[in-house]
Amino acid sequence: MQNKNYILQLFSCMFLMLLLVGFFQSWNLALSIFNLCIISAIMSLGINIQWGNAGIVNFGVMGFAALGGLANVIISMPPTLNAWEEGGILILSGIVTFIISIFCSIYLWKKLNIDKKKKYVITSIIIATSYFLMRYIIDIPILTIESIEPAKTGYLGGFDLPVIISWPIGGLLAALTAYAIGKIALGLRSDYLAIATLGISEIIIYVLKNEDWLSRGVKNVNGLPRPVPYEIELQSKQWVIEIAQFTNVSLPEISSIIVKLSYSFLFIIILIGILILLEIALKSPWGRMMRAIRDNEVSANAMGKNIKKRHLQVFIIGSAIIGIAGAMLTTLDGQFTPVSYQPLRFTFLVWIMVIIGGSGNNFGSIIGGFIIWFFWIQAEPIGLWLIAFITSYVSDSNLIKNHLLENAAHMRLMFMGIILLVTLRFAPKGLIPEVKR
């Protein structure tokens, strides 16, 4: 059994570090780090169920997170009525035509009793024809929509629904995309699967950056609605004024702290809900089957288990969790910026969270998410302090000292490397290893 006191000590140390940030820097910063740590922990849970419990390598983390952010825009932003009038229906009809053709080609592939080469030719012709038909239908409406007040809108907008609905929708959008990817890619060997998912992630982000009619592309979508009050609204509330007077904290700062605490409350509910569901799944016969497939696919296949089908299930579940986290992150930021999703940078950061915490253990993934994101943010101030301390006896005009102080932000890469090396040296299975049942 896992040592519960040890787990409690790890989480206590983590929260102590957050408290130190609050006392010595600012409570706003501490709560900002805390909220981002929760989102990171949810992302690492999504990777953990794929890799830690099923052995699936998914390097497409940022692609699924970006889809969660897109769901935020589609659900919560008001529709651009002029854009819909000028060609929104035509764009939808073109996309639906292409999707129907895909399903038709799949149906024909299954039903036609002909040579495989002929099947490839027929399905390729159907897909290519439907693609060019779709482009013929949507190209002119897209140009028209993107020219409608491009500085303000230039896109179709959304459904103007409560933003919190976008979180499960973001998970659903990521899950549907994972299903399509999984049906094609999950038959690949693990190293090829890693390359394929990374490439697909780049394609998703490339589309979001260039299809302005959908998400304004690199012009970004700003002013996303919130599930919590705005600071300016809180500052007029009597109870907030009384708290500010009692704590001797400025009104803007106390209102910002209340907003961040509100986000923390919502995020913790989501994190606990996902953790409980994953723990139930892990301890169920389904969870034992997935670990058996992970440990020995040949034996599991010999026992009659459909390996590809089970891998697809886990791939969809993990991607959906990442999509939820992506929607939460966009809600917290208040804007959707496709250029901020950098697969080669943040994908491996999430993987480090899983490795550091302990692959195959949900609590390990959570503590890994907290530790890595905390030091990712705090590496710069810690690096500045460390360099200033080491060079305290060196003249301020020294070029080397100035160069080191100016480049302290790059210390975070060194911190990640040191944390990873130390953990792998003294805890090769992670801080909280998988429990062997």
Image (cartoon, helix red, strand yellow):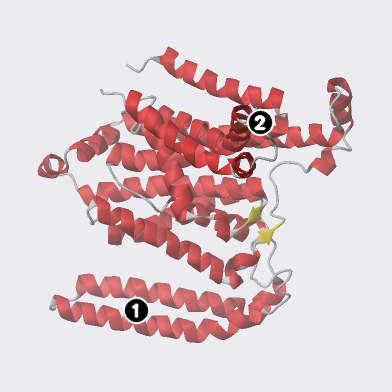
Secondary structure at badge 2 equals helix
User: For the residues carrying marks 2 and 1, which lies nearer the camera in this image?
Assistant: 2
Q: Quadrant of the N terminus?
A: top left
Query: Which is nearer the eye, 128 or 343?
Result: 343
The amino acid type of the residue labelled 2 equals Ala
Q: Quadrant of residue 328?
A: top right
- Identified at 60% across, 54% down, the residue is 72
Q: Residue furthest top?
A: 5
- Identified at 58% across, 46% down, the residue is 329
Whether pointer 2 and pointer 1 mark residues with C-beta atoms closer than 8 Å, the reply is no
Classify 10 Å Cα crowding around label 2: few (below 14), some (14-19), many (20 and above).
many
Q: Which residue is mark 1?
A: 127
Q: Which residue is mark 2?
A: 30
Height in image: 16 above or below 150? above
Where's residue 346, x and y in %? 48, 48
Classify 10 Å Cα crowding around label 1: few (below 14), some (14-19), many (20 and above).
some
What separation in Å lies between label 2 and label 1 (alpha carbons)?
51 Å
